[in-house]
Image (cartoon, helix red, strand yellow):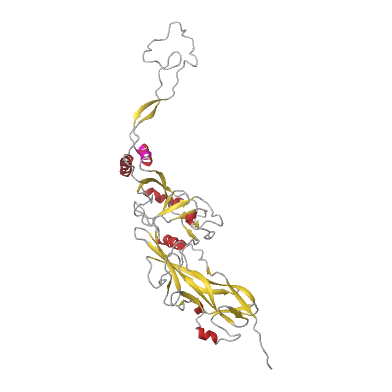
Amino acid sequence: MQAISAARAVRTVQVMKYRALSVGAALAMAAGGLALLAAPASAADGPPVVGCTTGSSCMVELNYEVAYTGSSGGSNGVVITPPPCIGIPIGDAHTGSQAIISLYGNTAPVAQPSTEPPAATATGGSPSPTDTTSPTDTASPTDSPSPAASTSPASTTTATTTALILSDQQQQILSQARQLAGTNPIAPGEWYQISGNPYATTTAQQKCTNLPPYIWVAGNNGTLRVKGLNIPPETLAALAYSQLNTAQLATVTLNPTTTSDTNLPTFVDVALRPPATGILSVTAAGDPYVWATAATPDGEAATVWAWVTGLSINPGTTNATTFNDARCSTAHLSADGHTLMLGSRYTAAEMQQVGVGQQIDCGVTYTAPGTYALTASVTWSACWARGLATAGGPPANCKPVPGATGLAASTSPPHHVAVREIQSVNNG
């Protein structure tokens, strides 16, 4: 199965107006998990954001009827099993209701076949009601009738009235359609016909037969709601993962702040920028993390946590030695106490004591003069657990996210470092 990278947010693609339903293990007669099914497509600069386990290139977004809390707005690659059912819109309270009334309310006479041949006239036609004349005496007994005059056993039709027999469920749908068709002003909402998802397996689509064939969605937002049909927690975890927005890095801070010298360490610090939506927190061990929860109205929820696993420094040249102790990727507060930082733990006084060629905890020593573009990056790992988010970071039962293709590293903007050669002075 091809892994799918997050080229663009799913909401930026043009989609067909379908609602897709994901079925839980215990299916009663109703649903709670909703989705949007898009036609096979690719983003302009890459493959679809979401892939299907069926191997097709369809994109499925199960964001209708799924509420997100915590970090959101990301577009992380994930493979999700396509939901088995879709809801196809057929019209509003008037047009959709009329379509259902035409289907379920049809009691017009139905043509029924009959094998009884009609009486033929001398010209081969059926006799009119007033035509009682017998054959003329001028006809010879030995004359054979012409083909046009011969009778045929071809079937004719008679009209009988056949009433459509509706189930209790269909009768309820018809009654609702008749009521909605007469609303003035028109009742806001839309009718949906429930059908199998063509991207799902044949076995999965069979679950759709337990759902009502037509569902009325009241209101202006067009959100399909069918009670009891649950999105599995594993799928909710994949959805939360796809939405997860990790923290980004601000411009790095260096010491010395202006010009660095060859063979003298330059200390590196970088600020973490919280996601636009969500909270940046720190575990008891000092690991920065974010979280996202996906939940359905029936109470099913899954939470994904992502935490920093390492900080790396790219000095912008091979003429350098980098230092990156484990403590560089744990958080500490900035000098003003307002910003979470990653990087060196040396105090300003300790930095002043470091000499030529000495090793430090987090930074770089340039060995040749020049101007270099230094960047810092942090890597992330993620896991999920059933239920809502809990304080303190990932719980002990946190598991790898199904279908996840890996979170992108967060990289700082380049910081241009001017490095000069150390000059020695000999007075002797």
Q: In this orientation, which residue lies closer to the viewer: 222 or 214?
A: 222
Left/right placement of residue 111 relative to residue 381 reads left
In the image as oriented, which residue stretches furthest toward the top? 138
Q: In this orientation, which residue lies closer to the viewer: 241 or 43?
A: 43
Q: Position of residue 411 (x, y in %)?
A: 54, 69
Secondary structure character of the magenta stretch overall: helix
Is residue 362 something one can see in this rendering? yes
Which segment is the magenta one?
97-101
In the image as oriented, which residue stretches furthest toward the front? 427
In the image as oriented, which residue stretches furthest toward the bottom? 428
Q: In this orientation, which residue lies closer to the viewer: 407 or 378?
A: 378
Q: Give above or below for 91 relative to 11.
A: above
Assign the C terminus to one quadrant of the image: bottom right
In the image as oriented, which residue stretches furthest toward the right? 428
Q: Position of residue 281 (x, y in %)?
A: 42, 72
Q: Position of residue 76 (x, y in %)?
A: 49, 62
Q: Position of residue 261 (x, y in %)?
A: 61, 81
**Image quadrant where residue 108 sits:** top left
Q: Looking at the image, which residue is at 45% across and 5% down?
A: 138
Q: In this orientation, which residue lies closer to the viewer: 338 or 284?
A: 338
Left/right placement of residue 102 relative to residue 8 reads left
Is residue 317 something one can see in this rendering? no
Q: Give above or below for 296 relative to 272.
A: above
Q: Give above or below for 256 relative to 239.
A: below
* Number of callouts: 0
Q: Is residue 98 magenta?
A: yes
Q: Is residue 278 magenta?
A: no
**Image quadrant where residue 390 sits:** bottom left
Q: Looking at the image, which residue is at 46% across and 8% down?
A: 141
